[in-house]
C-alpha cells in the first residue's frame, strides 16, 4: 500500500501552511455546521504527549458571554499597551482581535487533573501546553484549507476567563479563537505588513549540532 501523498495533495498541505494567517477581519456570515465539526475534529486529532489529550474546547454561543470575553480582552489590551512603553501608540493602532465580528468564538483550554499524567511530562510538564498548541495549529490549517479565517487571541487574564466560564480548579484557558468567513486572506502576516516585526530568516532559527557562539 502506497502511503505517500500525491503531488497535488502534498502541495495542498504546504500551501495551507504557507498561507495560514492570524485573521482579525471577518464577515458575519455563519460557518456551516459540517465545516465547524470538521475543524473541531481536526483539533481533536492533534498529537499529544502520552496521548493525554489535554485540550478542552468551550464554544461560546451566548451573546452576553461573548461580550464579557471581549471586555476582558479589551482590559488586557490597554494594560499591554501601557507595558510596551514607547511602542504603546503603535500597538494601539493594531487590530488585535475580531471577537465581535467573527461567526464562531471558541475558548481552547487545558484540562484539570493534568498532574496525574506523568508520561512525557516528568521533566517537561509544559508539554501539555505544547499539545494544546498542536490542536490549535491543526484547526488553523484545516480552517485555511476550508477557506475559513481563524485568529488566536491571547490578551486576557487566565484566572478571569476561567472564572467566567466556570472552569474547575486546575483547568486553564490558553486561547480565544475567532473563526469565520473573510473577504480575503492577508497576503502576509498582518503584524509584518504593519511593520511590527519581520519573519526571521532560517539561519537565525536553525542550528547544527550545538547552539552557535555569538
Image (cartoon, rainbow, N blue to C red):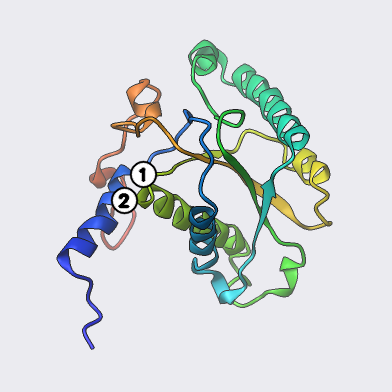
Q: Residues within 10 Å of mark 1 (few under 14, many from 20)?
A: many
- Nearest the camera: 86 or 128? 128
From this view, report whether residue 106 is shown above or below residue 194. Answer: below
Residue 189 drawn at (x, y percent)? 36, 33
Determine the residue positioned at 35% across, 34% down.
185
- Nearest the camera: 153 or 44? 44
Q: Quadrant of residue 211?
A: bottom left
Determine the residue positioned at 54% across, 40% down.
30
- Reading the image, the residue beneath label 2 is 16
From this view, report whether residue 71 is shown above or below residue 171. Answer: above
From this view, report whether residue 167 is shown above or below residue 87. Answer: below
Viewport quadrant of the N terminus:
bottom left
Residue 169 drawn at (x, y percent)? 83, 56
Residue 53 drawn at (x, y percent)? 61, 69
- Nearest the camera: 66 or 204? 66
Q: State the separation of the CA atoms marked 2 and 1.
A: 6 Å
Q: Tag count in the figure?
A: 2
Quick one: which residue is furthest to the bottom in this view?
A: 1
**On residue 99, which mark appears?**
none
Circles 2 and 1 in contact, beta carbons < 8 Å: yes
- Answer left or right for 67 relative to 16: right
- Answer left or right for 38 relative to 198: right
- Nearest the camera: 87 or 145? 145
Determine the residue positioned at 77% across, 33% down.
64
Viewport quadrant of the C terminus:
top left
- Reading the image, the residue beneath label 1 is 20
Residue 55 drawn at (x, y percent)? 63, 61
- Answer left or right for 40 relative to 9: right
Secondary-structure class at tag 1:
loop
Amino acid at each position: 500500500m502506497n502511503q505517500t501523498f500525491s503531488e497535488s495533495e502534498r502541495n495542498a498541505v504546504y500551501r495551507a501552511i504557507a498561507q495560514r494567517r492570524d485573521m482579525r477581519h471577518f464577515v458575519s456570515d455563519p460557518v456551516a455546521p459540517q465545516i465547524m465539526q470538521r475543524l473541531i475534529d481536526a483539533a481533536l486529532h492533534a498529537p499529544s504527549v502520552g496521548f493525554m489529550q489535554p485540550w478542552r474546547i468551550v464554544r461560546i454561543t451566548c451573546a452576553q458571554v461573548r461580550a464579557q470575553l471581549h471586555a476582558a480582552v479589551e482590559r488586557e489590551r490597554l494594560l499591554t499597551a501601557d507595558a510596551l512603553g514607547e511602542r504603546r501608540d503603535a500597538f494601539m493602532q493594531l487590530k488585535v482581535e475580531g471577537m465581535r465580528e467573527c461567526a464562531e468564538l471558541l475558548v481552547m483550554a487545558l484540562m484539570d487533573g493534568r498532574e496525574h499524567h506523568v508520561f512525557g511530562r516528568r521533566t517537561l510538564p509544559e508539554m501539555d501546553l505544547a499539545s494544546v498548541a498542536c490542536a490549535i495549529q491543526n484547526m488553523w490549517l484545516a480552517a485555511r484549507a476550508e477557506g475559513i479565517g481563524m485568529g488566536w487571541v491571547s490578551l486576557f487574564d487566565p484566572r478571569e476567563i476561567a472564572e467566567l466560564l466556570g472552569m474547575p480548579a486546575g483547568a486553564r484557558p490558553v486561547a480565544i479563537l475567532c473563526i469565520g468567513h473573510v473577504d480575503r486572506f492577508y497576503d502576509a502576516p498582518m503584524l509584518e505588513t504593519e511593520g511590527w516585526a519581520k519573519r526571521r530568516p532560517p539561519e537565525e532559527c536553525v542550528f547544527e549540532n550545538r547552539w552557535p557562539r555569538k
